Amino acid sequence: MKFKFFTIKKILLLSVLSLSTFSMLSQSDIVSIRTFEKGNTLVVNGNSFMINGMNWDMIPIGKDAVNTNFWNKSDELIKAGLELEMSLLKQMNVNAIRHYSDIPSKWVQYIFENYGIYTMLNHSFGRYGLTINGVWEPITDYSDHNTQKVLLSEIETVVNKYKNTPGLLLYLLGNENNYGLFWSGAETEDFPEEESKKKAVGEKYGRPMYKLMNLAAKKIKELDPNHPVAICNGDDLFIDIVAEECRDIDIFGVNSYRGASFTNLFKTVKETLNKPLLFTEFGADAYNSINSKEDQRSQANYLLENWKEIYENAAGMGKYENTIGGFTFQFSDGWWKYNFDHRKNVSKHDTVATWANGGYSVDLEEGENNMNEEWFGICAKGPTDNNGLYKLYPRAAYYVLQQIHQFNPYQEIANTNLLHSYFNGINLTNAIIRGKENERILANLTKEKDSLIIESSEKRTSSMLHITFDDDSKAFNFISFGGASFKIINNPKLPKNNTSTLKVGEITNSGNNWEGNYIDLKNPIHLENGNTITLTAYSKKPLSLLLKLERKNNKTISTEYNVLHTGNGWEELKYTFSSSNKYNRLVIFIDGPGTTSGSFYIDDITQSNSKIQLKN
């Protein structure tokens, strides 16, 4: 029995390898949708093609999706980075990646020709805002004529740039833009519960958007008849409007997070839309919100069940036969995702769950969030080197997917019995052992690196200033003068944009000129080590904050810098001094020469220098 099972796996692997070899040799790909009586397949150069895809990006710790600039590096560094990532993807039998249209066409071709991996090219279609007539509009109005003109022009430019690129698989419009009709930021939020409100949003804002997507699809196919067009919808929300307005799209793509099962999604798409179903995103995070620790087993289990359903519903397998594959979300952890709209904590692996999902019952508690945006990677992300590159450390899910993607549902002998037999034979235990070993290796590496950073930092910057009132409230009690007062309190203005701090310093002005607060420092500030001090302050009034550095035994030796606070709540203020002296007293004046009264809050007073890399 064991030999028989091994033989089946060998046949399946050879089937996949023969298809990928054929694809790699092809220089001019023709991709289309083939429609059968019961179902659909994606066809690449005449061969049915099951998408074993991955949502992929190249964002090191300390960067985010906006400022990573990977494609602006030298060709040598880009090739080195791609080798680190694409070789791992190829080893796990991934045949396509999803990436946004900032990837240069030459690298789409390079990835295909060197690793046999196709690219689904994703245009966000105004999901995160647009520049209209020189003005940035954070919320896209799809009914606006100028907006329509800009988007269709962008689409035309993209197609003309990529249409003849070897390795291009298909075009994808948007990224759950129907969800963006409810909130404008990039972070996931909960929906309103009222169905009437959802329906109203769909009619007022969704219908114009889907109409425009359909126009874009028609334009793409006019310019490039050799590659299909998909839209990326947030699950099946507004699918009835999609059926009415998007008749010219080829593929219905969904970002779907329903837990271990997609439940009735295959049926809904079949009966309502009757178009090929592509899972543009799905997956599970690798962090357990109840136990507060990494949970590789549950992530691997969720993905195993998800992919089994995808294959079960492929053409020829006897169920709904309407899925053409999917793109697991995602290849590596996104350290930048929590609080992304404020561009904070990009060097911290946050464990804050930002939304609740009942489909992921393993770590679900009533009334609590359980979805950890920064932990969806099937690989953990290692430290960034001097070239801005990093290594990945596969979790158990990687090794499970490596086995899953050896199955070819389009082979002649494929059926649900064979599928279930194959999936039952997947070695989850070994995958967990290998994933946990990688977790241990990365943990030890991180400890060693942290130790070196701290040791080096202490040698160079033994007096670098860092005041946060959560650390030691007694050590950082300011002394007031001139009518002001100071005390350390629980943060009354949560959530604070830059940290999850619980305590802050409260400064109360009585309305006198030059009232302020000072602290004498145990370790003097050496400005030669870092001439910039940042201060986070809360105010609802526009005013100036003056920071003065003194020597307490000789106040004639001092330096000061004044910064304007705009009055918009928590703001990070930056003070850059020209002095290189040492100071042991720090003085804060809120509206120093003025007579502003009231309470204000401060926190996170930190000395830094752009030439010195500090551990965040």
Image: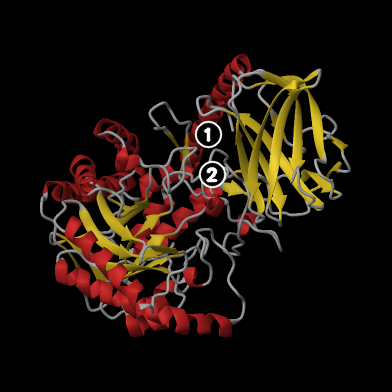
Q: Position of residue 456 (x, y in %)?
A: 57, 17
Question: Relative to 172, does residue 458 appear above or below in the rendering?
Answer: above
> Circle 1 sits on which residue?
439
Question: Relative to 382, does residue 150 appear above or below in the rendering?
Answer: below
Quadrant hosting residue 412: bottom left
Question: Relative to 343, does residue 390 appear above or below in the rendering?
Answer: above
Circle 1: residue type: Glu
**Element under label 2?**
helix
Q: Position of residue 356 (x, y in %)?
A: 62, 62
Circle 2: residue type: Gln
Q: Position of residue 94 (x, y in %)?
A: 31, 48
Asked if the residue at tag 2 contacts the one at tag 1, i.e. Cβ–Cβ closer than 8 Å, the answer is yes
Residue 458 shown left or right of residue 254 in the figure: right
Residue 562 shown left or right of residue 505 in the figure: left
Q: Is residue 315 visible?
A: no
- Return the residue nearer the eye: 150 or 379: 150
Q: CA distance from mark 1 to mark 2?
A: 10 Å
Q: Is residue 79 visible?
A: yes
- Mark 2, Cα crowd under 10 Å, few <14 / some 14-19 / many 20+, is many
- Return the residue nearer the eye: 170 or 478: 478
User: Residue visible at 58% across and 59% down?
Assistant: 360
Residue 560 shown left or right of residue 59 in the figure: right
First-in-chain label (1 vs 2):
2
- Return the residue nearer the eye: 221 or 616: 616
> Circle 2 sits on which residue?
296
